[in-house]
Amino acid sequence: MKKVRLLALFLVIFNSGYHAQMKSSSKIESGVSYELAQWRKSTLSDIQYELNLKIPESKSERIAGTEVLTFTYKKQNETALLIDFKEDPTSLLSVSVNGKTIKPILENEHVVVDAQYLKSGSNQIHFNFLAGDGALNRRDGYLYALFVPDRARTMFPCFDQPNLKAKYSLKLTIPEKWSAISNGKLEDTFVQQGQKTLKFNQSDLLPTYLFSFAAGDFKNHTERISQQDSRMLYRETDSVKIKNSMDSIFSIYRNSLAYYEKWTGIKHPFQKHGMAVIPDFQFGGMEHPGAILFKNSVLFLDKNTTQNQLNSRSNLIAHEVAHLWFGDMVTMDWFNDVWMKEVFANFMADKSTGASTDKSVYDLKFLTAHYPAAYSVDRTLGANPIRQVLDNLQNAGMMYGPIIYDKAPIMMRQLELLIGEDVFRKGVSEYLSKYAYNNASWPDLITILDKHTPKDLQSWNKVWVNDPGRPLVDYNIQYKGEKIERFTVFQKPEYGKEQKSWPQEFEISLFYTDRVEKVNVKLEGKQQDISELKGKTKPLFILQNSSGIGYGVFKTDKAVISNFSLVKDPISRASAYISLYENMLNSSGVETQDLLSFFAEQLPKETTELNLRLITGYLTSIYWNFLPENARLKESANIEEKLWKALQVQTAKNNKKIMFDAYQDIFQSQQAYDTLYKIWKSKTPPQDVSLNDEDFTNLALALSLRNSNNKELLNEQLTRIENPDRITRFKIIMQAASSDQKVRDDFFNGLMQKQNRTNESAVGAALSYLHHPLRQQTSVHYLPKTLDILQEIQQTGAIFFPDNWLRSTFSSYQDPKALEAVSQFLLKNPDYNSILKNKILQATDNLRRAQTLLK
């Protein structure tokens, strides 16, 4: 019966969408509506694009293009065909349909082709156009196409929706010294009069968002992957980083590939491997088959890299390779299921990288990587469900964030625990085989898994996938003498009055002076007695979720802090750190000052690198966000001293580097300034602390925030940077870090112009300096404009930029004036886009909580 209901629901949605399109076909809506997408899916097939682009060296010159679009069409009545092209009408130079030249009509982001020119069966449309630059990321000396989720239409006329897969033939004419890469294999190269024309083989079947190319003044590196030559394009100039990284990059790629082929039972599903490594890339990576894009700073590391950086690189490469199966071969039908490709990529990346490590190492990495990030959104009033509603693809970019990247893998792990690893793997393999080179939805996967398990996946799915938020997990103990008579666990939603529960597994540990006793809990309802604990001796303290697998805010015994030396297991310590911080934010029995002191005391004692990074992050957050300014100044010298002493006590080089970074983030005293300035000026770090060029750049910026006349300091740092791409980045950031208010004002006002926001990564970093807690008295007046332009940021920027824009601005504010600016904006805009409103509430959650925690 469950399967029949799912099918019936799908047919209702499809038919209502289809008929809505028929009724409203005379009205052309911007973007790609769900109704338009469904109608086109029902009438179009066998789509092929032949593109020929002439790319000049100067980024100010337009790119001329020709296109041949071929497709099979089921002609239905006299409805016009809409082809997406989000450009100025003057960019559409000519159109011919089935050999007949027609007048180009570009209306509300669509090329309109009247039905009289089309026929049932094969059709061919020729376009001459000027390519839009919005998604081509044109920089000095290079460019790269980034079309996710609906930005292919900003470059060329296309059917820009994920369930109309097509094959792409590409020809690029570029400056002779440039190189290029695309989805298809390079077939031929012609050089003539300083120009080079590259012809690429027809690609595999892809949605528009996975079609891509990169071209520019890149270096080339070739290695063998799966018995074929595979190229990497890159611009890194640091020879030490290149030598230290290249073997590792390709090794991780090969290992990930082998793991997924074995786990899925499906060989690599595309014609080639290839990657381009991009400076200041706005994502970590993007999974275009045969032309995966990666962020330079994540891949190229020096010999003194931290474990966190190594983990980030491994996870990123494994994540993008996993997409070749999850997202690329089987693609979501509509972008409301974009989370599916991301959860599988993250979940499988964790499996892949964890396969070669001890389980405890894997569990700790999973815990510290995903839980704090997921909680950062799921604890807020703007929390969104994993699976969201999407009416138009022009809003798809707003669906990305920590919920799909971090909560979803946690959810998937709980699903695997619920139905069993073998059943999970069998169901996923069946799903991949059934929908190979096609499209599928989350209900399609749940339907398959449902066949293999007696568990009620529909109820489980509602609370974990379709609803936002997390549970508050509390417990009650009744003692009889020194023995536990009854131990009961309760759960309820963090927000709202709806009665619901999260089926999940977690561990409870009872700590004694000489031992730890553990019990695994399978929580299925709102309240559950843990019979295994009856008769146990009264412990010194209890730690819920000691294995770090459970999800929610777990009540944490105050005695954990005073007896923390008994918590020997690194995973249990990490889980305790996270729970204490979350309870502090909720004002649930953990005081801000007490937790700050506890984390400071742990600095020399905590030797596990991932845990040390976790608590220094929490310490920094409490210091800047949740202490009043007078308390912060009072604590400053004490925290500085403890960090510096911990730097001396820690023996591992990576741990020393973490201490140094935290000291650099927090310092406020003149003595600390003088110490750090001397280190920067002489380029001589403390003993056993390794600092590279980017570290010295960050140190210069930290110093500049505490310097009332920093022009000379910033200019000197600029002269030290050798890499041209890093010079470009620093020139943007140094404006925001300037001690001159007018320079900062001019920088911020300049961001109101789209052309000054093209380097989104650098702009995001710059905003964090502009709105640093030490600058907020002179930056709070920027906030109304920051909010006013948010919708334009969403329309013109890449998928992560609206969130980056907001978090880089608001995440460290505690001033009531900042909250008032937010409240007034929302009050004046009662009908504001609901997804963007949630982004605002997410980014300002610390600001809201600070009003309570500072009292």
Image: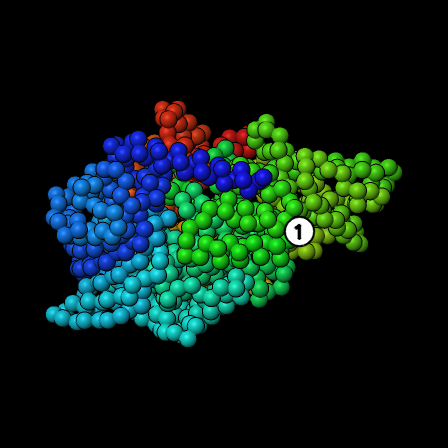
Horizontal side, residue 397 vs residue 29: left or right: right
Which residue is found at the position 59% from the left and 27% from the top?
497
Residue 253 falls in image quadrant: bottom left
Considering depth in this image, is 497 or 620 the residue closer to the camera? Answer: 497
Q: Position of residue 624 (x, y in %)?
A: 49, 41
Q: Which residue is mark 1?
A: 547
Q: Position of residue 566 (x, y in %)?
A: 73, 52
Which residue is found at the position 59% from the left and 33% from the top?
494
> Is residue 723 visible in this depiction of the protein?
no
Considering depth in this image, is 801 or 445 the residue closer to the camera? Answer: 445
Q: Position of residue 581 (x, y in %)?
A: 59, 42
Amino acid type shown at disc 1: Ser
Q: Secondary structure at mark 1?
A: loop
Considering depth in this image, is 735 or 250 the residue closer to the camera? Answer: 250
Label 1 Cα neighbours within 10 Å, binned few <14 / some 14-19 / many ≥20: many
Which residue is found at the position 20% from the left and 64% from the top?
174
Q: Is residue 324 above or below residue 800?
A: below
Quarter in which the C terminus is drawn: top right
> Is residue 415 visible in this depiction of the protein?
yes
Q: Position of residue 356 (x, y in %)?
A: 57, 66
Quarter in which the N terminus is drawn: top right
Residue 746 falls in image quadrant: top left
Q: Is residue 357 above or below residue 711?
A: below
**Image colouring:** rainbow
Residue 114 falls in image quadrant: top left
Considering depth in this image, is 672 or 228 the residue closer to the camera? Answer: 228
Which residue is found at the position 83% from the left and 38% from the top?
485
